[in-house]
Amino acid sequence: MNEDDEARRHRLRMEKRKAVQDAEVAGKTVARKGLLIVHTGAGKGKSTAAFGLALRALGHGWKIGVVQFGKGQWRTGERNMLEKLGQESGQVSWHTLGEGFTWETQDRARDEAAARRAWEKARELMDDPEVRLLVLDELNISLRYEHLPLDEVLEALAARRDDLNVVVTGRNAKPELIAAADLVTEMTLVKHHFAAGVKAQEGIEF
């Protein structure tokens, strides 16, 4: 087979592929919908992906909100950058309201109170008509340990504004949350440098 024949076969394959792709796109009739997105799984990258989405939204002029459940008050690179962008543009509302993970605090009442404060802030941002994207970072952890009532959270998420996109991160997403979501991505752990004794590093983990 000469180069012309190979080029012709490739063009025919791509024409067929394009026809299939165009038909699939044409079949989508909902132009815009606020999505409930869940990032879960044992692999690294759940929050990282959510903050990448937040950066994309900012690039389109959206106002975004971030509420961190469980995570303590340490300074992360994404927090530094997004808060800086928020100060410059007024597009970012960032709230780290956890006191550390439950295995660190070892105080259930304190964990529940922190989760409740974070959830109240989340509800406030959900009611803000200017917020287009809301990241509820590590909410899955609060739900897993029953620091918040699952039914209450699901009801509020279901009643959110039509134009509000919500991203929920954290391992062990509840089956009910997965069922309610529009998009679910599970990060699968294949290999992690922690297993080789590498500590969490600035710029990679935080």
Image (cartoon, grey):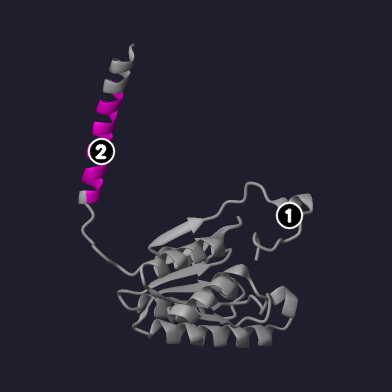
* Rendered location of residue 72, percent (x, y): 66, 78
Q: Please identify the quadrant where the C terminus is shown.
A: bottom right
Q: What residue type is labelled 1?
A: Phe
* Rendered location of residue 160, percent (x, y): 36, 78
Q: Looking at the image, can residue 92 be seen?
A: no
Q: Which amino acid does label 2 sit on?
A: Lys
The residue that appears at 38% across and 85% down in the rendered structure is: 127
> Start and end of the magenta stretch?
9-25
The residue that appears at 23% across and 62% down in the rendered structure is: 30
Q: Give the secondary structure at mark 1.
A: helix
Would you say the magenta stretch is mainly helix, strand or loop? Answer: helix
Q: Looking at the image, can residue 47 be seen?
A: yes
**Residue 53 sits above or below residue 125 on the image:** above
The residue pinned by badge 1 equals: 194
Q: Please identify the quadrant where the N terminus is shown.
A: top left
The residue that appears at 42% across and 71% down in the rendered structure is: 166
- Looking at the picture, tell me which residue is in the foreground, 88 or 22: 88
- Looking at the picture, tell me which residue is in the foreground, 203 or 18: 203
Question: Is 10 within the magenta?
Answer: yes
The residue pinned by badge 2 equals: 18
Q: Could you give the CA–CA distance between mark 1 and mark 2, rounded to whole angstroms?
A: 43 Å
Q: Residues within 10 Å of mark 2 (few under 14, many from 20)?
A: few
**Residue 42 picture quarter:** bottom right
Which of the two discs, 1 and 2, labels the residue nearer the N terminus?
Answer: 2
* Rendered location of residue 82, percent (x, y): 52, 73
Q: Residue extending furthest right?
A: 197
Question: Is 28 within the magenta?
Answer: no
